[in-house]
């Protein structure tokens, strides 16, 4: 049975003013309402109210993961280097990885994601096909030394993630584990009250093939996605690999020549091209030796080697092999995956000779190169154009004008395939008595980020406004007066608590009713029950935090209503 939480005894300090460094609504409100406190850049402490919301999100995630048969485990966050060296991620992760040494000088890392360690666990525990399929998950602290930790718990350097991993012996098995996770994620976000869209995504550092993201539309989001108002097409713009421009070449002004020694930055390009701020720049088209080719904008810096062979200093570039293409639709325009053509086709650009198909050759080994710098590794005759995605560009499946939206990535699911199983030779004895290579999926939810995403989507001008499932309490009882009001508030609060309702009672002495009301709105519990003027008659006022609707009820009526 929950106890009444008396504010006079709780460690709650609300702030009247926004923290100076807060850029987003959720950051401002979670700090002001006393849910979280910054410890250092991107590292946060969860205070009593915040911890409850965080635990509520974790509970929903846990219930739905258990419901699909996933088993909860807890692996360490402090990990040895060796497994990450085997997969190459010790290097590949770059500056985002927290690396540290122990007293003997051995290298360790703080886990940013755990594919390697789960693969090794299953290699140790599962030896026969009869041990599979298996789905494992944990809700755990993750570490990423983000270049720009921002917006409070939205992008932390230490944060809570639910990560799960599936192990199957067949592709169909993997597809089923993926489908189960996808459906569980839909239920989780529905229960949490988070509006979301499922979009095609780029696999990024995970590798692997199919991948989808769960995006929570919000102005504070760092992801841009395109979606079709007519059909269900939606994709992260990171995954959109074609220009999506009308075939007549209209859309944005012809670019001027760029005078820059290096691959231009996105900002330089946008300024030179005069494209709208809402546009997302993808590949830069350049003319080299009379031929048009594409260079990835910074981040990727990848070029079609077919066109540039002979121009590049071999030491400067890293060749991209066919394996690298699998699941990296961002590296090629249109790509061939396990289900055939999975990428989107490059639309004909009027400035490119008719019939040029950018997909041909893209999947052959050694046809692309990474880390290429225009001007340094080859001479550029002319900078031509960038591939942009703009609102109104035609939807690849139905042609309707696409809309752009901003969103927060709250979940990401991957069909990894055999990348990690190959790296660690994860085999089990198959039904025919021969070893079978295991195929994997990995699935993440940002548990702490979901708290911020919920705050972004639900808060209003007065403060936080939690959906019932995650709120730190069900009812916030305000004693708006002196002894009489406090007595009634505590009495009603105790009865509600006895009936299983989670109650906060603001019984603070010497705090004005006005301050208590403001705090109640800021804290954002769904129902506010006020013991005020008519307390002597045993009448209270019940207020809905979201709608502001209020009604007067006797104590018994209020208890009946709220239980
Ligand atoms: P982002 O694009 O925002 O950097 P990501 O694609 O790097 O996220 P994944 O590797 O897919 O993240 O991790 C799974 C989930 O973990 C993400 O969908 C997100 O919800 C959450 N997450 C990732 N990085 C952070 C972070 N720095 N702080 C809080 N949550 C995070
Ligand atoms: Mg990231
Ligand atoms: Mg991402
Ligand atoms: Mg992701």
Image: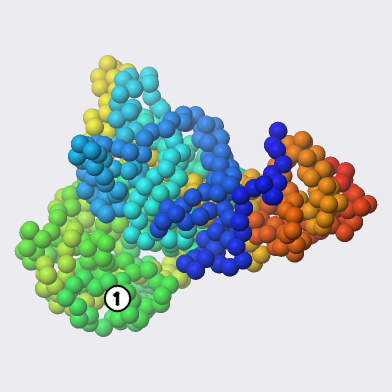
Residue under the point 31% across and 20% down: 127
SS at badge 1: helix
| Residue 159 against residue 222 in the figure, above or below | above
Q: Residue furthest front?
A: 510
Residue under the point 25% across and 60% down: 300
Residue situated in front as seen by the camera: 337 or 437: 437
Q: Which residue is mark 1?
A: 269
Q: In the image, 486: left or right of 467?
A: right
Q: Quadrant of the N terminus?
A: top right
Residue under the point 21% across and 61% down: 302
Q: In the image, 278: left or right of 92?
A: right
Residue situated in front as seen by the camera: 485 or 343: 485
Q: Quadrant of the C terminus?
A: top right
Q: Disc 1, ligand 1: is the CB inside 8 Å?
A: no
The image quadrant of residue 399 is bottom left
Residue situated in front as seen by the camera: 420 or 332: 420
Residue 155, horizontal then vertical, whole percent: 43, 56
Q: Residue furthest top?
A: 433
Q: Residue furthest right?
A: 537
Residue under the point 44% across and 34% down: 137
Residue 383, horizontal then vertical, whole percent: 21, 77
The answer to whether residue 211 is visible is no
The image quadrant of residue 264 is bottom left
The answer to whether residue 130 is visible is yes
């Amino acid at each position: 049975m929950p106890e009444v939480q008396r504010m006079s005894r709780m460690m709650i300090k609300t702030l009247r003013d926004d923290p100076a460094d807060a850029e987003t609504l959720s950051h401002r409100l979670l700090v002001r309402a006393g849910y979280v406190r910054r410890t250092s850049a991107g590292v946060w402490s969860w205070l009593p109210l915040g911890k409850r919301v965080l635990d509520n999100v974790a509970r929903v995630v846990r219930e739905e993961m258990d419901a699909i048969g996933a088993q909860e485990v807890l692996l360490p966050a402090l990990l040895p280097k060796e497994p990450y060296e085997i997969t190459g991620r010790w290097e590949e992760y770059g500056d985002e990885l927290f690396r540290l040494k122990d007293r003997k000088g051995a290298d360790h890392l703080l886990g940013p994601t755990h594919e390697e360690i789960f693969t090794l666990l299953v290699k140790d525990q599962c030896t026969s096909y009869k041990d599979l399929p298996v789905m494992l998950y944990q809700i755990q602290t993750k570490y990423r030394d983000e270049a720009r930790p921002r917006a409070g718990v939205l992008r932390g350097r230490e944060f809570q993630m639910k990560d799960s991993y599936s192990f199957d012996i067949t592709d169909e098995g993997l597809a089923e584990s993926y489908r189960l996770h996808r459906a569980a994620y839909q239920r989780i976000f529905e229960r949490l009250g988070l509006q979301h869209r499922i979009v095609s995504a780029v696999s990024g550092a995970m590798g692997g093939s199919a991948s989808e993201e769960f995006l929570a539309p919000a102005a504070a989001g760092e992801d841009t996605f395109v979606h079709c108002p007519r059909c269900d097409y939606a994709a992260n713009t990171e995954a959109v690999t074609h220009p999506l421009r009308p075939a007549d070449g209209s859309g944005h002004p012809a670019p001027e020549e760029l005078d820059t020694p290096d691959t231009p930055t996105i900002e330089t390009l946008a300024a030179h091209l005069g494209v709208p701020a809402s546009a997302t720049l993808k590949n830069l088209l350049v003319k080299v030796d009379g031929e048009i080719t594409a260079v990835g904008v910074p981040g990727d810096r990848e070029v079609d080697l077919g066109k540039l062979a002979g121009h590049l200093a071999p030491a400067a570039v890293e060749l991209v092999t066919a394996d690298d293409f699998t699941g990296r639709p961002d590296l090629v325009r249109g790509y061939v995956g396990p289900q055939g053509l999975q990428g989107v086709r490059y639309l004909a650009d009027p400035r490119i000779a008719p019939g040029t198909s950018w997909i041909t050759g893209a999947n052959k080994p050694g046809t692309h190169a990474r880390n290429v710098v225009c001007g340094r590794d080859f001479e550029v005759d002319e900078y031509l154009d960038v591939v942009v995605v703009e609102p109104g560009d035609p939807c690849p499946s139905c042609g309707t004008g696409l809309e752009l939206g901003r969103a927060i990535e709250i979940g990401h699911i991957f069909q990894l395939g055999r990348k990690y199983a190959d790296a660690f030779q994860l085999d089990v004895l198959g039904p025919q008595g021969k070893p079978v290579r295991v195929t994997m999926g990995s699935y993440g939810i940002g548990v702490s980020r979901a708290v911020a995403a919920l705050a972004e989507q639900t808060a209003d001008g007065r403060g936080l406004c939690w959906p019932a499932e995650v709120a730190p309490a069900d009812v916030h009882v305000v004693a708006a007066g002196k002894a009489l009001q406090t007595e009634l508030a505590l009495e009603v609060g105790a009865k509600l608590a006895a009936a299983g309702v989670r109650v906060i009672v603001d019984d603070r002495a010497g705090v004005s009713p006005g301050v208590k009301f403001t705090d109640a709105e800021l804290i954002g519990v769904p129902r506010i029950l006020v013991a005020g003027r008519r307390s002597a008659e045993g009448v209270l006022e019940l207020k809905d935090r979201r709608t502001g609707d209020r009604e007067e009820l006797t104590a018994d009526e209020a208890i009946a209503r709220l239980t």
